[in-house]
Image (cartoon, coloured by chain):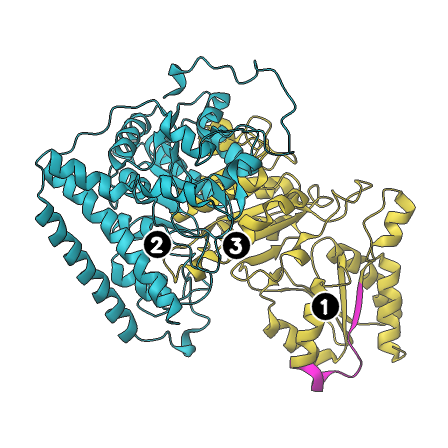
Chain colours: A cyan, B yellow
């Protein structure tokens, strides 16, 4: 549903006492209100893909999934350290948005849950895995770690570990795009920036500040909310006064769209609409992708709060299986072909691990390198 | 040649650099139509347009973060803190993003950005508008910190800061904007990392910066009459310190007095004293002495405010005692 489709009045309702404080979003759905929203989602027109495009999406999502599974394994085997946040379940968002954009032309900005965004941007699995192992061959030379993946080559503005801080940085990249076009007179400057962040971030000031500035200056940016319902242990419905984040766009006079974040073709279609608007100078879009992370917040999270029924609801809507069904039903690929891709990805991930294990540690002599621009 | 006011010296520097490099832009509150709260960007909006001199909403962390993203993607933004104290709201963006990002990215990105504005204690502006953030930001890795004190160094340092490929925190002082002097002709820059020897002397080294330079100059006049020969050094670069110049001076005078406007605890002088103790211990004939502001929120009342920051007579007394060996 887009902003134009809604006639619901955000302020017209009657306020009623609602039982326990902070639990205003009542739902009788067995898997909770987030699941209920997904089920009631107005079905948008999904993107149509040909065989080649479909396989790009499939490959990217499988790479994201298998890479993260391998990270969990390596973490528990003591090969990577610190806070590691996995993306399992949310692949349709990264793939749906980033693969609709232009690699090494458009810009991408992520959060602490950034491995899969980096992979979708084209950062080689070897470089991402090496970074997680803290090796010199990592995309951030082992200085960043899981939450600080960067690649100038692939226009990854970074993984930002604090909530919300990446959004203004993404806004800056979008500003540069417009600046080059309108202040420097470079008519070819049409890059679009995608800023990814979660539902928890939509309660922080920078989110609203940046929506405002992006709207004011019609900046070419996509605000992509990965609403996975949980900010560690804080249920989205206990954290925000209006859980429908996409509707907040209306306050800034920009389009907002609610998207099935478990359907890569739905995400792709919404992204394509937003990219088209951004590239043609019509400004920003807020996309709220309803999704779910299959694992805990990080590998250090015991994940004790979330209900089994809720987890099962989302597992049944797995984005990879869904695309596989689409591709086979539309005769775009056979099951065997997809299995062959799975095996190729497994080999790619295994190669990344092998590469990262054998890669050199950063030299202690270069401990203070990269502080200054000249070094 | 006519004299130039300090705020106009800054304006000239920004104007010249914007003309020289179209990637240089200004963003902040009231920098455009209003011309800047201290008129440092007056009329630049008409000359360069609204994108290059961008009036932002009041959203310090977001427009500072936007400058980081702009710098990462090829622009050279100058962020104005209407009052530097407001940039407490942008502490995360200055620290985590401007300061640390080049390192955490393993050299993927550079951040050529300047964050400038009025700092220091003014006249009865109250505690929140009387901050000395140079001390708060001092521990942040990856940023250069500069404090200007005269129209000449303001212009030369601003141009150097804009051309530098690293993030620079550029402290002006709210009470120095109307200083005036004749500027050197032509396109000159001052080195960001070099202290300025304001007056050579043999008895005592005084290290200071920003407005306190002018308090020290007053004190030096009295001390001169008493026969105390002061070597006065304006630090200019608060991070990193120009230790070469400082060491050379202490080797000559063997006595050092630090005069600062920031608070004593965790101040600029605290770090300076530690470095001097580490590097110049054998050259010192007396313990280093520090004159700092009181460790309190700056009071509104004028008398109390004057008691909070160092006054010239205190500098005279400390220098006299240091020379006489009674400290």
Residue B290: x and y in percent read 79, 68
Closer to us: A362 or B51: A362
On the rendered image, what quadrant is the C terminus of chain A found in? Answer: bottom left
Please state the chain letter of the residue tagged with numbered disc 1 in the rendered image. Answer: B
**CA distance for labels 3 and 1:** 24 Å
Please state the chain letter of the residue tagged with numbered disc 2 in the rendered image. Answer: A
Residue under label 2? A115
Closer to us: A333 or A359: A333
Report the span colored magenta.
B279-291
Residue under label 3? B96
Is residue A142 visible to us here?
A: yes
* Mark 2 Cα shell of 10 Å, populated few (<14), some (14-19), many (≥20): many
Instruction: Locate residue A318 relative to residue B193 in the image: left or right.
Output: left
> Where A314 falls versus A298 (above or below)?
above
Instruction: Kindly identify the residue that appears in the image at 64 percent across and 33 percent down.
Output: A20
Q: Secondary structure at mark 1?
A: helix
* Residues indicated by labels 1 and 2 sit on the same polypeptide chain: no
- CB-based contact (under 8 Å), mark 1 and mark 2: no
Residue under label 1? B270
Please state the chain letter of the residue tagged with numbered disc 3 in the rendered image. Answer: B
* Mark 3 Cα shell of 10 Å, populated few (<14), some (14-19), many (≥20): some
Q: Secondary structure at mark 3?
A: helix
Residue A92: x and y in percent read 29, 41
Residue A43: x and y in percent read 30, 23
Q: Quadrant of residue B60?
A: top right
Closer to us: A192 or B198: A192
Foreground mark, 3 or 1? 3
**CA distance for labels 1 and 2:** 42 Å
Counting residues from the start of the chain, the first of labels 3 and 1 encountered is: 3
Q: Quadrant of residue B205?
A: bottom right
* Mark 1 Cα shell of 10 Å, populated few (<14), some (14-19), many (≥20): some
Foreground mark, 3 or 2? 2
């Amino acid at each position: 549903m887009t902003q134009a489709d809604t006639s619901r009045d955000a302020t017209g309702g009657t306020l009623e006492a609602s039982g326990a404080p902070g639990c205003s979003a009542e739902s009788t759905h067995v898997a909770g209100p987030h699941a209920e929203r997904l089920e009631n989602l107005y079905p948008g027109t999904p993107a149509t893909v040909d065989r080649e495009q479909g396989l790009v999406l499939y490959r990217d999502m499988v790479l994201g999934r298998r890479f993260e599974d391998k990270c969990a394994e390596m973490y528990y085997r003591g090969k990577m350290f610190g806070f590691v946040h996995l993306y399992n379940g949310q692949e349709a968002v990264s793939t749906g948005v980033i693969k609709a954009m232009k690699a090494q032309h458009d810009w991408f900005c992520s959060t602490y849950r950034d491995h899969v965004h980096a992979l979708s941007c084209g950062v080689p699995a070897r470089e991402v895995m090496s970074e997680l192992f803290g090796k010199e061959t990592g995309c951030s030379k082992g200085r960043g770690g899981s939450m600080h993946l960067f690649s100038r080559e692939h226009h990854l503005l970074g993984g930002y570990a604090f909530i919300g801080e990446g959004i203004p940085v993404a806004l800056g990249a979008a500003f540069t795009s417009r600046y080059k076009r309108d202040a420097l007179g470079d008519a070819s400057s049409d890059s679009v920036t995608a800023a990814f962040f979660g539902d928890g971030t939509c309660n922080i000031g920078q989110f609203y500040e940046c929506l405002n500035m992006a709207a004011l200056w019609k900046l070419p940016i996509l605000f992509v909310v990965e609403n996975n319902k949980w900010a560690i242990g804080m249920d989205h419905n206990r954290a925000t006064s209006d859980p429908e984040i996409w509707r907040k766009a209306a306050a800034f006079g920009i389009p907002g769209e609610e998207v099935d974040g478990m359907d890569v073709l739905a995400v792709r279609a919404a992204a394509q609409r937003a990219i088209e608007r951004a590239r043609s100078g019509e400004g920003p879009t807020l996309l709220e992708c309803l999704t779910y992370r299959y694992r805990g917040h990080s590998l250090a999270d015991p994940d004790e709060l979330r209900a089994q029924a809720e987890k099962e609801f989302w597992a049944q809507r797995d984005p990879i299986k869904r695309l596989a069904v689409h591709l086979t039903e539309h005769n775009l690929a056979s099951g065997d072909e997809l299995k062959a891709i799975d095996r190729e990805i497994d080999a790619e991930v295994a190669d990344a691990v092998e590469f990262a294990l054998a890669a050199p540690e950063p030299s202690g002599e270069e401990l203070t390198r990269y502080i200054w621009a000249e070094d | 040649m006519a004299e130039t006011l300090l705020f106009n010296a800054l304006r000239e520097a920004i104007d010249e650099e914007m003309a020289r490099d179209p990637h240089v832009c200004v963003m902040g509150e009231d920098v455009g139509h209003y011309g800047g709260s201290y008129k440092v960007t007056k009329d630049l909006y008409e000359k360069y347009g609204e994108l290059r001199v961008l009036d932002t909403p009041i959203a310090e962390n977001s427009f500072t973060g936007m400058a980081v993203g702009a710098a990462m993607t090829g622009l050279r933004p100058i962020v104005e803190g209407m009052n530097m104290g407001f940039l407490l709201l942008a502490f995360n963006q200055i620290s985590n993003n401007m300061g640390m990002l080049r390192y955490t990215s393993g050299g993927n990105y550079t951040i050529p950005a300047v964050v400038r504005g009025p700092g220091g204690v003014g006249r009865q502006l109250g505690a929140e508008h009387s901050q000395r953030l140079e001390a708060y930001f001092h521990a942040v890795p990856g940023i250069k910190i500069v404090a200007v004190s005269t129209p000449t160094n303001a212009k030369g340092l601003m141009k150097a800061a804009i051309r530098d490929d690293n993030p620079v925190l550029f402290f002006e002082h709210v009470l120095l904007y109307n200083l005036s002097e004749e500027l050197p002709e032509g396109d000159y820059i001052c080195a960001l990392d070099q202290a300025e020897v304001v007056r050579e002397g043999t008895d005592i080294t005084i290290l200071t910066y920003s407005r306190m330079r002018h308090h020290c100059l007053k004190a030096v006049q009295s001390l001169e009459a008493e026969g105390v020969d002061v070597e006065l050094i304006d630090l200019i670069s608060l991070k990193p310190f120009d230790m070469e110049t400082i060491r050379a001076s202490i080797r000559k005078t063997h006595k050092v007095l630090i005069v600062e406007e920031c608070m004593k605890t965790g101040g600029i002088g605290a770090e300076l004293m530690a470095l001097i103790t580490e590097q110049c211990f054998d050259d010192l004939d007396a313990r280093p002495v520090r004159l700092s502001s009181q460790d309190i929120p700056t009071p509104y009342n004028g008398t109390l405010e004057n008691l909070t920051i160092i006054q010239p007579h205190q500098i005279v007394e400390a220098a006299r005692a240091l020379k006489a060996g009674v400290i």
